[in-house]
Image: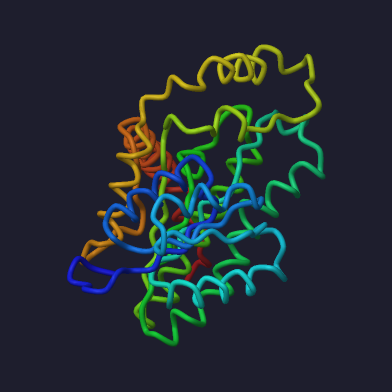
Amino acid sequence: MTEKQTNPAVWFITGVSSGFGRSLAEAVLARGDKVVGTVRNDAQIAPFENLAPERAHGVLLDVTDAAAVPRAISQAIERAGPIDVLVNNAGYGLFGAFEEVSDAEARQLFDTNVFGTVNVIRTVLPHFRERGRGHIVNFSSVAGVIGITGCSFYCASKHAIEGLSESLARELRPFGIRVTVVEPGGFRTNFAGGSLKWSEVESPIYTETVGKMRRHMSSYHGTQAGDPAKAADAIVRAVCADAPPLRLALGPDAVDVVRKKLSSVQNDLEAWLDVSSSTNFDH
């Protein structure tokens, strides 16, 4: 999708009841485009559709229900037309030390953050390939760039989205399909509030490490510097660009995280260059 497109574009955005999904939907609707947004219960449909009657369409979907995704996509195309932009925003944060998080908690997280994204992409891709165009926007996080104390499994889920997105970008480029992975820093959404889950177990051995994170997050919610509306505008600009980025860091804190990560990787590479380069067979 570029600024030259004359007909309203159709965006399919998962998780539009609040947070980034809602802000992005509002920005897209303000452009005059159409949005099909997924919600988790019937009561959320009418408030969403009232944002722009005839252009905002709510559909019920739990992205972890693989069988339900094709029905939701078919409903979206029937109501709004062929999809131009797919935004995988649905997901949540799970915090807790590695040893505190149960197998069930970790698997549920991956079912939503990773396989939920996979379910939607698998369904939309044939439509994109048939049309010879489309744009996939996958939400990652600064947690997809670095490891953070107290959220190892959440970081792992977002690192998975990073690798998936980069590979998809290479695979889909010949079909005219673009991929962008969004890496937000701290924004004033509900991520650190009701959307954040903590491990049910809280071990005293992590009181001075992960425990500090628990205490910090309780006061962090509602104080983040990032404005979700401005983040949404930035995502729209990236999608509409002639050469959209593969990665879009959002927020000065995210930019700082990425720069520090690149510097750390470069430092390790140079410090161990001789060892790293000495592993071929001798000739």
| Residue 251 location, quadrant | top left
Left or right of residue 36: residue 260: left
Colouring method of the image: rainbow
Work out whether residue 41 or residue 98 is closer to the camera in this orientation and state it.
41
Quadrant assignment for the N terminus: bottom left
Q: Is residue 203 above or below residue 184?
A: above
Q: Is residue 163 above or below residue 145?
A: below
User: Toward which corner of the image does residue 97 lie, by quadrant?
Assistant: top right
From the top left corner, tell me how far across and down residue 234 is, in percent.
28, 47
Of all residues shown, which one is farthest toward the bottom?
130
Q: Position of residue 56 (x, y in %)?
A: 44, 59
Looking at the image, how many numbered discs can be counted on the residues?
Answer: 0
Residue 95 picture location, percent across and down: 65, 31
In-image side of 30 versus 86 (left or right): left
**Residue shown at 41% from the left, 68% from the top:** 169
What residue appears at the point 72 percent right and 71 percent down from the top-left corner?
A: 67
196 left or right, relative to 255: right
- Residue 248: give x, y in percent of width and height: 34, 49
Above or below — where is 15 with respect to 35?
above
Looking at the image, which residue is at 41% across and 50% down? 51
Please report the residue visible at 61 percent of the width from the left and 35 percent of the height from the top: 195
Quick one: 257 or 91, which is closer to the camera? 91
Q: Observer-nearest residue: 86 or 247?
A: 86
